[in-house]
Image: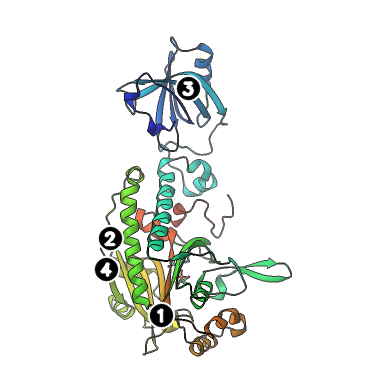
Amino acid sequence: MRSTEIKPEMDGERVIIAGWVHEVRDLGGLVFIVIRDRDGFIQITLPKKTVNLEMFKKAKKISRESVIKVEGIVKREDKAPNGFEIIPDIFEILSESHSPLPLEVTEKVPADLETRLDNRFMDLRRPKVSSIFRIKSQISKSIRDFLSNRGFIEVHTPKIVSTATEGGTELFPISYFEREAFLNQSPQLYKQILMSAGLEKVFEIGPIFRAEEHNTTRHLNEATSVDIEMSFVDHEGVMEILEEMVKKVYGNVIEKCEKQLKTLEIELEVPKTPFKRITYTEAIKILENKIPWGEDLDLQALKTIGNEIGGFYFITEWPTKIKPFYVMPFEDDRICKSFDLMYGYIEIASGAQREHRYEKLLENIKRRNLYPESFEFYLKAFRYGIPPHAGWGLGLERLIMAMLGLSNIREAMLFPRDRTRLVP
Ligand code: AMO
């Protein structure tokens, strides 16, 4: 049985439980063991006088974090953590833990992030850490449900590719038989091709790979991206989907992850939609024109803007030249139909209406000194009828960072990959 399935009202009933030895308290003639499973804690109590002596000795010697299986009788006990304890008559060691432990599982001793990540299997045994991933699982499920209910089909695009989408310097090259290939930075080109294919509304939740040199608290070299692409809409249509999705995800997490939020000591509120929208030009004004029009917003600039606005907001109408070749410009082609969804200073998502006019797209590729030949497989899909379309990509770990107030994105990844980390 799971720890959460046993209640004090089951007094006198026989149960079997299994889990890790979280704590052992040896009072001489009385041994208390706290067993931890995925859902919680259970105390088992072994009074020397009444239990089998062999078993008593075995329990007394058990090392912390060993995995044990216990069969015994539930006894109502107001002083025990959940109002009951278990008096065992069978005590089986399934796997004995070595000691000393590489990391403390009890929250008593803080450890630095590097040590925690080096011993992630152990770190994840801490309820505060595993709660993050229970919430992450709920978020993925909510996103799938939300998008599926809106008629999106889930797709899986290749992760081994031949061209860059977001810029050449951030690519990881790999050897692909006799050729060079790359790990994909974004499903961008493929999700757009699927608009030519007539799928109309697609989404993907999958890994993206970015060879970012800089080691920051917001960047990973392998992250999870939630991507959508939709036909016959403009950027505003997909911004509405994005904000409604974020709102729904918050609502679902509040409803379904009450226990995990409590463990993390977080009180969440559903953000109100529509989110605020400011244009890039307005953002520059907040910065009192410290950044010249046309330049990208750096961290300091985003912090100033984030402090001024707070919560979720969109930055729209970006200068065309600092956004990728596939975005659609406005009539005044200095600005484009591109947007970023921000939370404070963190960029959560970015998207745009796309350039679907073949000639213009070709021109954009050339203007950015990219090779049209490398994009032929993509460009081809624009020559035989493609609807106007728009979409966005959202960093799942960034959303979790924002939602749970995590100070480092690595906390939101089970096994993060960064500039120096390739194991575990
Ligand atoms: P962009 O490059 O802005 O856009 O990426 C989309 C979102 O993905 C997340 N993200 C990252 N998260 C963690 N570590 C990283 N290194 C990292 N890089 C990106 C961010 C970001 O907002 N093709 C477009 C999307 C589109 O237009 O549909 C794209 O990839 O949250």
Residue under label 4, please give it: 274
Q: Which of the two labelled residues, at mark 3 and mark 1, occupies the earlier sequence position?
A: 3
Q: Residues within 10 Å of mark 2 (few under 14, many from 20)?
A: some
Give the side of residue 184 with respect to residue 77, left or right. right
Residues under labels 4 and 3: Cα distance?
Answer: 54 Å
* Mark 3 residue type: Glu
Mark 2: which secondary structure? loop
Q: CA distance from mark 1 to mark 4?
A: 27 Å
Whether residue 317 is visible: yes
Q: Is residue 26 above or below residue 97?
A: above
Residue 271, disc: 2
Q: Amino acid at mark 1?
A: Glu
Label 2 vs 1, first from the N-terminus: 2
SS under mark 3: strand
Q: Amino acid at mark 4?
A: Pro
Quick check: 26 left or right of 255? right
Residue 71 is labelled as 3
Which residue is at a point 69% across and 66% down the rendered structure image? 175
Could you tell me how far apart the alpha carbons at marks 3 and 2 are, in whole angstroms?
47 Å
Q: Give above or below for 31 relative to 21.
A: above
